[in-house]
Image (tube, rainbow, N blue to C red):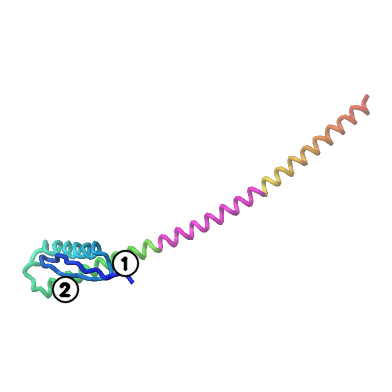
Amino acid sequence: MPAKNTTQVLIAGKIVTLSGYESEEYLQKVAAYLNGKIAELSELPGYNRQPMETKHTMLSLNVADDYFKARRQAESLEEDMQLKDKETYNLKHDLIAAQIELENVKKELESLKSSKEELSEKYAKLEQELDDLLK
């Protein structure tokens, strides 16, 4: 099991101790995200005059909104990836079928070339026989 990390971060101007199995860099990134959200909300008119509970609720709602949007995007990307995988599979299948058809056409071409040579030889023999008969 990975080691538990503990680090101090600054959130909304207060030092908070976070601990978890994620890296310290990740915990700092989470704190920076929250600080960014708080700064974003602070720009809204009247936000700073709201009670702390309302501010926390607004922050929670914004974080939840980001989460659901990110989840929807991830699901959409997953669907796109599955469609691309299916398309790739179908293209590979079509390619294999085309390669098999090409091999069959090559064999048929070789067979036709061989037949042509045989017929050309027969034609030449018959022409020679005709020439011999006409002489």
Q: Compare residues 69 and 38 and report the one nearer the observer.
A: 38
Whole-percent x and y of residue 43?
Answer: 11, 61
Residue located beneath label 1 in the image: 71
Tell me if residue 26 comes above or below residue 112 in the rendering.
below
Residue 50 belongs to magenta span: no
Q: Name which quarter of the figure residue 39 lies in.
A: bottom left
Q: Amino acid at mark 2?
A: Thr
Q: Is residue 77 left or right of residue 47?
A: right
Q: Name which quarter of the figure residue 59 lies in.
A: bottom left
Q: Compare residues 132 and 90 and report the one nearer the observer.
A: 90
Q: Which residues are magenta?
A: 79-103
Q: In this view, which residue lies farthest toward the top?
A: 135
Whole-percent x and y of residue 110?
Answer: 72, 43
Residue at 46 percent of width and 59 percent of height: 85
Residue at 45 percent of width and 60 percent of height: 83
Q: Name which quarter of the figure residue 79 lies in.
A: bottom left
Q: In this view, which residue lies farthest toward the left?
A: 49
Residue 86, labelled with which disc?
none
C-beta proximity under 8 Å, tags 2 and 1: no
- Which quadrant is home to the C terminus? top right
Residue at 12 percent of width and 67 percent of height: 15
Residue at 31 percent of width and 69 percent of height: 2
Tag 1 or tag 2, which sits nearer the N-term? 2
Magenta stretch: helix, strand or loop mostly: helix
Q: Compare residues 128 and 102 and report the one nearer the observer.
A: 102
Residue located beneath label 2 in the image: 57
Whole-percent x and y of residue 122?
Answer: 84, 36
